[in-house]
Image (cartoon, grey):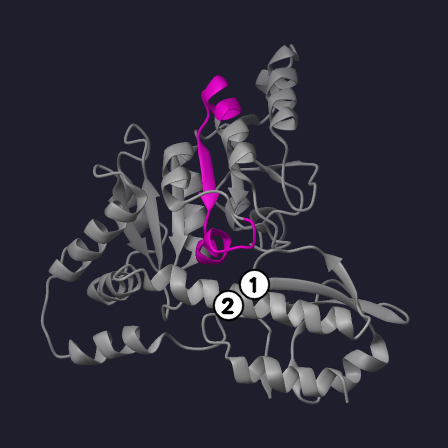
Amino acid sequence: MIYFNSDYTAGAHAKVLDALVRTNLEHSVGYGLDPYTAEAKTLMREAIGCADAEIILLVGGTQTNATAIDGLLARHEGVLCADSGHIAVHESGAIEASGHKVLTLPEYCGKVRAENVDRYITEFYRDETCQHMVAPGMLYISQPTEYGTIYSLEELEGLSAVCHKHNIPLYIDGARMGYALTAEGADFTLRDIARLADVFYIGGTKCGALFGEALVVTNRALLKNLFPLVKQHGALLAKGRLLGLQFGVLFRDNLYERICGNAVRLALRLREIMRKADYEVVIESPTNQQFFRLPNDVIDRLRKSVSFDYWGPRGADSSIVRFVTSWATTEEDIEEFRRVIIP
């Protein structure tokens, strides 16, 4: 079976596992106060070009989003987000469960436009009844989006400028950040992300780690009591060394971007195979997520040897499906898929 369901179906990169095994019987202080976590934070601060950024390692993406958003918002505020955004669709109400409404905006290829954010906030405060409504207290975007698309540097700068104009923080969900940084045509760097976002996270779970996300706070005026907030949300790992070790490995010798870049390269090869087989590419994604419309009989045939997911409900005659490569995808996987798709 060839697996293209998601980028977290395999375990962890071999170098990550080696570090975990090699240090398994060492004893260290807990909760991320160990030397390995300190080293990982140093490496990440160097990568983002922000020596005084606060960084804390959490166990998973949903907990990271819920923790950061809860901490950034006042009780009467909600979070602006594309109507296709992860927190609006695939978080099972985790944000609402913490008492904050997700305020959705129209999406364009998975993205929100700066002018729409500006208009929403401006019109909100022009309404004389605004104090009876949930106030827009921050902007959430993901890089890449749910559709595998990416914000350009110009788009990120526009969103950051609008957020600063209205004095709200820009928060970037980076669960797949490695695949965005190495996407086809990407014109931004991790340093740009750190310069433009007030808070963001660097995903590990989908990018070569067993689990874990690195929450980065570049605006130190925000999230002043981050440690207890993380614990309140059940996202603090007692054996914090396990997270520190993994991010230390991923951010040493540029491993993070190298393995994610390979996944993107293979995803684009998969897309070309599908094009040559005359199947419709639904979204022009430059990252490791690729979307196709396939006849249902082709889907049924493929699923005997290839694992992938529907993107929405199954249609009457054809359906949209998603294929995702990962740091663990190999050249052999792609070649085997070529043989399967073109029998």
Residue 191 visible, this orientation: yes
Q: Position of residue 176 (x, y in %)?
A: 48, 57
Residue holding disc 1: 288
- Report x, y in % for residue 25: 12, 79
Side of 273 where 316 appears, left or right:
right
| Circle 2: residue type | Ala
Residue at the spot x=16%, y=54% of the render?
38
User: What residue did someone put label 2 on?
Assistant: 263
Q: Which x, y percent locates residue 261?
A: 46, 62
80 or 73: which is nearer to us?
80
Q: Is residue 252 magenta?
A: no
Q: Are marks 2 and 1 in contact (CB under 8 Å)?
A: yes
Q: Please tell me which of labels 2 and 1 falls first in the chain.
A: 2
Regarding mark 1 in the picture, which secondary structure is present there? loop
The quadrant in which the C terminus is found is bottom right
User: Can residue 32 be seen?
Assistant: no
Q: Is residue 167 magenta?
A: yes
Identify the image quadrant of residue 216. Answer: top left
Who is closer to the viewer here, 8 or 15? 15
State which region is magenta.
161-185
Relative height, residue 78 to residue 287 (above, below): above
> Does dot 2 land on a helix, a strand or a loop?
helix
Kind of residue sitting beneath label 1: Asn
Q: How crowded is mark 2: few (under 14 residues within 10 Å), some or many (20 or more)?
A: many
